[in-house]
Amino acid sequence: MTLRVEHDIFVVRQRGREVAALLGIEHQDQIRIATALSEMGRHLLATGGGADVVFLAHPAAVEQPALHIELTSVRPVDGGVLAPQQAAVGRLVDMLDVTESDRATVVRMSRRIPSSVAPLTWQGLEEVRAQLAESEPSTALDELALQNEQLIAALDEVRSQRDELARLNEELQETNRGVMALYGQLSEELEETNRGVVALYAELDEKSAQLRAASESKSRFLANVSHELRAPVTAIIGLARLLADSASDPLTDEQSRQVGLIRSSAGDLLALVNQLLDLAKAESGRIEPNWVEVDLRVLFGQLRGTLRAVASRPEVDLVVEDPPQPALIRSDEVLLSQILRNLLHNGLKFTEQGEVRMRAEQVGDRWLITVTDTGVGIPAELHERVFEEFYQAPGPRRTVGTGLGLPYARRLATLLGGTLELTSEPGRGSTLSVHLPRGGA
């Protein structure tokens, strides 16, 4: 169709809207296409003497189908003249392109057809062409009235959107006020919590310092008292030995019995003093392991021979199994021997009949040494308490002891890079397990 006079601008606008409607383009996009056509048509009429307008739609389009419109001016138009309109019209359509030549200026624009519309066919396009041929162009007055209606509707929509935007802004401001109030409240609570945490840390530091001081004082007290007691206790043992010596003046039977009690009590007290000294050394960190290669088979043989004399009950068997070869571990032989001797002595002390068995096996890169007895057993709730200093688990009979053997053994095991754990049930005996790294700590 041609655009030569001002009335044709209204016709082109009407045709563009009708074509868009027949192709299924949405109502708002129809108005945008009509507005774009009227704007470009008006400027081409004023600067290019008019234009020929062609509407194109292809049913075999590979991409999303679109309505394409070409306006070819009667004579060339300077591109600078159309630049302001090109920017404004470009916002109304999906694509806008202006091509200049010596003969004419071609303006191409397009708008996508919604994917919800049925696919275009040649038959459908023929029906569109037939409907356009049957429709009569409206007068300029009718088109102007329709344009005013569309403008009023657009203004109403803009006003509605503006009111909705104002409402949303008010809600957003209210939300922001709530968020700021919540942020302030959370900030105050967080600051209060931080003050509480800082105060708690300060209190913990103070308590830790007091605990360290108490522990150091206890260690010094144990070391000093033990050291001061060791000399007189040793002297008492020596004097008792002299009194009982056959070279000394003979004693009556009652005197011999009393001297024997003195000597036995002094020996128990000396053992306690020695344990206190060892525990004080372990707590103060003054024990430095002497790392060497230890043959467990040799160590087990020494313990077997030493403790067989201690096993005073004939109804209790001491069984020390030889570890599998190679039985080498990097450790401190003296400290390891003290650990195992304490465990074996503990088992013999609390077992009235059955056996006390020690065995060792390699588990990965660690040695597992277990001492199992058939004694009275220990309830589960007391498993950790037996590793507390001076604590002795209750049993059917009172057993002589200091309650320092297991705590000292666990400290030495930790010093050697291992652990000491207890597994026990009342009436089923106990198992003490020492886990030690094969290559040392």
Image (cartoon, rainbow, N blue to C red):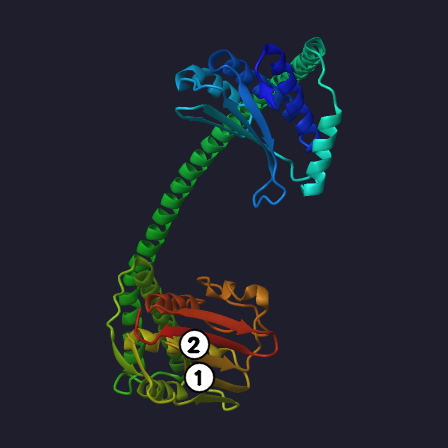
Q: Which mark is residue 358?
A: 1
Give the residue drawn at x 50%, y 11%. Answer: 46
- Residue 24 coordinates in the image, percent (x, y): 69, 33
Assign a secondary structure to mark 1: strand
- Residue 43 coordinates in the image, percent (x, y): 51, 14
Assign a secondary structure to mark 2: helix
Q: Which mark is nearer the camera, 2 or 1?
A: 1
Give the residue drawn at x 67%, y 28%. Answer: 19
Give the residue drawn at x 55%, y 86%. Answer: 353
Q: Can residue 171 be seen in this view?
A: no
- Residue 176 coordinates in the image, percent (x, y): 57, 21
Observer-nearest of 72 and 171: 72
Relative vertical location of residue 116 with respect to residue 299 in this rendering, above or below? above
Q: Residue 343 carries which label?
A: 2
Marks 2/1 in contact by CB < 8 Å: the verdict is: yes
The answer to which quarter of the image holds residue 208 is top left
Extreme top residue here? 141
Relative vertical location of residue 398 with respect to residue 249 in this rendering, above or below? above
